[in-house]
Amino acid sequence: MSVISIAIQKGGSGKTTTAINLAAALQHMGKTILLFDADPQANLSQSLGVLDEPEKNLFTELKKEIAGESGDLQQVIIQTKSGLPLVPSSIELAGAELELVSVYGREQVFSWLLEPLKNKYDFIFIDCPPAIGMLTVNALVASDYVLMPLQAEFLPLKGLRSFMHHFKAVKSKLNRNLEVLGFMLTRYDERKTMNRQVYRQLEQEFGDKAFRTHIRSNIQLSKAQEAGTDIFSFDKHSHGAQDYQNLAEEFIRKLAK
């Protein structure tokens, strides 16, 4: 069992799209998956058709832990129409981030919440906020790996380098077992010189941590999220489905090394 944070210090990088569609591809390969929406914007929850905030969600259980009680994620997991189990988010998580600052063991709260679930799934994917705050730190401390999607442009590459500074701090001080699984490019167009240059730079700086699979620009990925489902349920013959299937296969190979 592995917990993987999907994180990067940049919005619009494809974190949520990757969380949904990589999880769906792995589920089609026979793996058991749990999605965990740690972003107060709740993009993951909404992209899986959860438009109204459930009465019980990540925030309600986080509040229990902050109050010194035991939260229970099992009771908040919902089955989405794509068949992916989800711990839904809440807009109130933004306030909880401030409350966490004064909590004993503040970086460990997600770890405590996830511990009872670890033997029930092959993979737990945490969709992180696009910033380094207590929610993202909690996710990284609870994780075995971090997967970083980024657009194939130079500004996101700078954001990646900034994120790596925080990653190293979390690894050295809070979670020595945390590893980078890899970096993957989204909205990729092989015809664009800049896209190819960014990939070459990733390879030069990070070697085999740069995924060879790129996620091409594909409108069907956006349409699938609008429909509240994954790309395989929406259009299994699309480039998006093909790319995420390839990514899932490379993902499994990287873990096996």
Image (tube, rainbow, N blue to C red):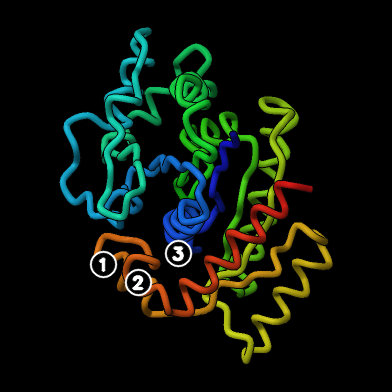
Q: Quadrant of residue 103?
A: top left
The residue depicted at 31 percent of the width and 40 percent of the height is 89
Q: Secondary structure at mark 1?
A: helix
Dot 3 alpha-carbon crowd within 10 angstroms: few under 14, some 14 to 19, many 20 or more: some
Name the residue carrying label 3: 12
Dot 2 alpha-carbon crowd within 10 angstroms: few under 14, some 14 to 19, many 20 or more: some
Residue 224 position in % (x across, y down): 32, 68
Along the polypeptide, which appears first: circle 2 or circle 3? 3
CB of mark 2 within 8 Å of CB of mark 1?
yes
Looking at the image, can residue 254 be seen?
yes
- CA–CA distance between discs 2 and 3? 12 Å
Name the residue carrying label 2: 222
Residue 162 position in % (x across, y down): 66, 52
Q: Secondary structure at mark 3?
A: loop
Residue 93 position in % (x across, y down): 33, 35
Residue 155 position in % (x across, y down): 60, 69
Name the residue carrying label 1: 226
The residue depicted at 31 percent of the width and 34 percent of the height is 77
Please name which of the two marks, 1 or 3, marks the residue nearer to the observer: 1
CB of mark 1 within 8 Å of CB of mark 3?
no
- CA–CA distance between discs 2 and 1? 6 Å
Q: Secondary structure at mark 2?
A: helix
Along the polypeptide, which appears first: circle 1 or circle 3? 3
Residue extending farthest to the top is 68
Please name which of the two marks, 2 or 3, marks the residue nearer to the observer: 2
Drawn side of residue 19 relative to residue 228, left or right: right
Above or below, 192 relative to 25 = below
